[in-house]
Structure formats: C-alpha cells, structure tokens
Image (cartoon, helix red, strand yellow):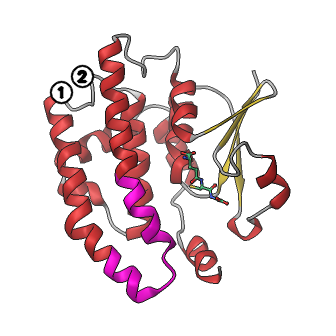
Amino acid sequence: MPRKLTYFNINGLAEPIRYILHYTKQDFEDVRLEFGNWPDLKLKESLPFGQLPLYEEDGRVLCQSLAIAKYVARGTDLIPSDPWKQAQVESAVYSVLDYWKNVTPVIQEKDPAKQKELIEKIYSETIPYYFSRFSKLLKENGGYFSGKLSWGEFILLGIVEAGNLFFGTDLEKKYPAVEAIVEEIRNLPGVKDYIVARGPYNFEEIKARLNKQ
Ligand SMILES: N[C@@H](CCC(=O)N[C@@H](CS)C(=O)NCC(=O)O)C(=O)O
C-alpha cells in the first residue's frame, strides 16, 4: 500500500506522524519541501485546506495532522481499545495543540522587539501553565495520558520538539514526567534509528524565510 507524507523539511506538525510510521514499521515516502520554494501556489491550491501536512494512500488524500496521526496509528497498540481511554488521549492531544496555538503567533511575529516580549510571556506564563498540567496528567496515568503508550504521547513529543527548535532549548528538562516520555519515545525501535538517520534540524532556514516575508 503506497503511503506518502508531504510536509516541510522541518519537524513541526509532521514529525509525530513520521515517528508513528517508523515505530509501527509502515513504509512511506517522506516528501520534504524546502521553505525557499513555498508557497508553491499550484500545490497549495491542490491541498484540501491549503496547508501541510498532507497524507496520501492509494490515491486518497488526508489533511489535518491529528487526523493523520490517529489514522496511521489505527490497528496498532497506539490506540487504546477502551473508549474512555481513547477520549482521555484525545483530550490530552487537544490540550497539547492548545499550547501550540499560543506559540505559533510568536514564531510568526516579524518585529524582533515584539517577538522578544511575546517569548518572555510564553516562558513566564504559557509554558509553566501547560507543561505543569501535562506533567500532572502523565503522573496520574502511570507516565502516559491513558495508562499506556498511545499516539497522544507522540503528539506531545512532536510539539515539545517543535518548540525546542524555535526556542533553542530543551523545554522538557524542567518537567521530569514530560522528559521521561519524550526520552522513552525517542528510544523506541524504529524511532531511534530514524532520528540517527535524520540528524538534527536547523531552524536558521525557516527563520531566514520568515524574516523575508
Ligand atoms: N490544523 C492543521 C494546521 C496545518 C498548518 O498550520 N500547516 C502549516 C505548517 S505547520 C502550513 O502549511 N503553512 C503554510 C501555509 O499556510 O501556507 C494541521 O494540524 O494539520
């Protein structure tokens, strides 16, 4: 079954999907666009909502990173069988994305002084607010969002790493429960090899592009 995931050559919203595909040993074409070539208007117009990631399988297309992540996790042990646990995972995932919605306007801010001010607020308010709650959820549920590893913790890892790339730090270090799950997933078979093969991301290119706009 040919699978294709298209995104930018950065971690962002696609990395948890890449991690799940590698962990669950599903072959896929990992298409990475360079920021310098975006917007590719022809491609953008062909996308269901003009944005990436896009997942393709057997001629069908799917957008929205969470829907894609959950779809590629189906039929694996990453989806809890109990409906309540499934809902617990989704509740956590939506909260992780709520956190990220606070960060994206800061990444996109072009005025350096304003961006500095916004980063300070993210550090003093947003990160402590959300990360303390992610920690609490993980601690209350045996280190996971619903008692065992699910696609939800992959989303958390992806969003933590996307923030780390932008802020130039390791946000999880101050939150041991978050750090533990992040490290657990990074060391999973499939994921570990992928990270080694992939190497680190470089945020300079995206910064240069955002500054040019
Ligand atoms: N809710 C969407 C958001 C997708 C999104 O924001 N994609 C961004 C990259 S992270 C994008 O395609 N930006 C380019 C553009 O909008 O032209 C998802 O989760 O997939």
Using the image as rendered, state which of residue 25 and residue 132 is in the foreground: 132
Using the image as rendered, state which of residue 104 and residue 192 is in the foreground: 104
Q: Residue at x 75, y 46 (%)?
A: 47
Q: Quadrant of residue 208?
A: bottom right
Three-letter amino acid code of the residue under disc 1: Gly
Residue 119 magenta:
no
> Eyeballing the image, is 210 above or below 63?
below
Q: Quadrant of the N terminus?
A: top right
Q: Residue at x 29, y 59 (%)?
A: 171
> Eyeballing the image, is 109 above or below 188?
below
Q: Which mark is residue 142?
A: 1
Mark 2: give few (<14), some (14-19) or many (20+) Cα within 10 Å. Answer: some
**Earlier-in-chain disc, 1 versus 2:** 1
Q: Quadrant of the C terminus?
A: bottom right
Mark 1: give few (<14), some (14-19) or many (20+) Cα within 10 Å. Answer: few
Image marks 1 and 2: residues in contact by CB distance under 8 Å = yes
* Separation of residues labelled 1 and 2 (CA atoms): 5 Å
Q: Residue at x 55, y 40 (%)?
A: 65
Three-letter amino acid code of the residue under disc 2: Gly
Residue 22 in view: no
Residue 107 magenta:
yes
Residue 109 in the figure: left or right of residue 100: right
Question: Residue beneath label 2, please?
Answer: 147
Q: Which mark is residue 59?
A: none
Judged from the image, the secondary structure of the residue bearing numbered disc 1 is: loop
Residue 176 in the figure: left or right of residue 100: left
Residue interval drawn in magenta: 99-118
Q: Quadrant of residue 39?
A: bottom right
Judged from the image, the secondary structure of the residue bearing numbered disc 2 is: loop
Q: Quadrant of residue 6?
A: top right
